[in-house]
């Protein structure tokens, strides 16, 4: 079973004013959230130890779909996003070349799994 990427993340109560509409919809005063991780770029040394498969981004592509195809687990979508320095699918444009790092266990070890 895959380890949780949330295991070392702080949980906090978000009371930011910009979420007031959400609070009203949910009838709550705050929402509990995981802190956004601070991830460093993968070093050149590690990149040289990995195999990189290139994927030209096309209409309908999603990081989770690429993770399911390459890693057999859509939960590793964030690995591909992180490796390409594109936090979300919306940061990709048709024609962008997305690099999928292999093997996944080496990448996860670097991240602390």
Image (cartoon, rainbow, N blue to C red):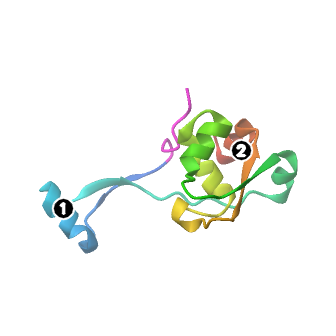
Magenta region, mostly helix, strand or loop?
A: loop
Q: Which comes sooner in the sequence, label 1 or label 2?
A: 1
Instruction: Write down the quadrant of residue 82 in the picture.
Output: bottom right
Say which of 54 and 32 sits in front: 54
Res. 88 visible in picture: no
Q: Which residue is mark 1?
A: 23
- Find numbered disc 2 in the image and state the secondary structure of the residue it sits on: helix
Residue 107's tag is 2
Instruction: Write down the quadrant of residue 45 in the picture.
Output: bottom right
Whole-angstrom CA distance, mark 1 to mark 2, is 37 Å
Is 7 one of the magenta-colored residues?
yes
Taking the spot 56% from the left edge, 67% from the top edge, the residue there is 91
- Find numbered disc 1 in the image and state the secondary structure of the residue it sits on: helix
Q: Quadrant of the C terminus?
A: top right
Q: Please state the horizontal and vertical placement of residue 3, each as a whole percent of the image.
A: 55, 34
Asked if the residues shown at circle 1 and circle 2 are in contact, with their CB atoms under 8 angstroms apart, the answer is no
Taking the spot 53% from the left edge, 43% from the top edge, the residue there is 5
Q: Is residue 52 left or right of residue 77?
A: right
Taking the spot 18% from the left edge, 61% from the top edge, the residue there is 23
Instruction: Write down the quadrant of residue 76 in the picture.
Output: top right
Res. 70 visible in picture: yes
Magenta stretch, residue numbers: 1-8
Is 9 one of the magenta-colored residues?
no
Q: Is residue 91 left or right of residue 57?
A: left
């Amino acid at each position: 079973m895959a380890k949780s990427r949330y295991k070392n993340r702080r949980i906090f109560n978000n009371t930011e004013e910009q979420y007031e509409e959400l609070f009203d919809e949910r009838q709550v005063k705050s929402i509990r959230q995981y802190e956004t991780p601070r991830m460093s770029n993968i070093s050149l040394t590690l990149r040289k130890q990995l195999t990189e498969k290139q994927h030209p981004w096309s209409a309908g592509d999603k990081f989770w779909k690429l993770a399911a195809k390459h890693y057999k687990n859509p939960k590793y979508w964030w690995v591909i996003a992180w490796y390409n320095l594109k936090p979300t699918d919306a940061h990709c444009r048709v024609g962008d070349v997305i690099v999928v790092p292999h093997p996944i266990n080496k990448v996860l070890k670097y991240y602390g799994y």
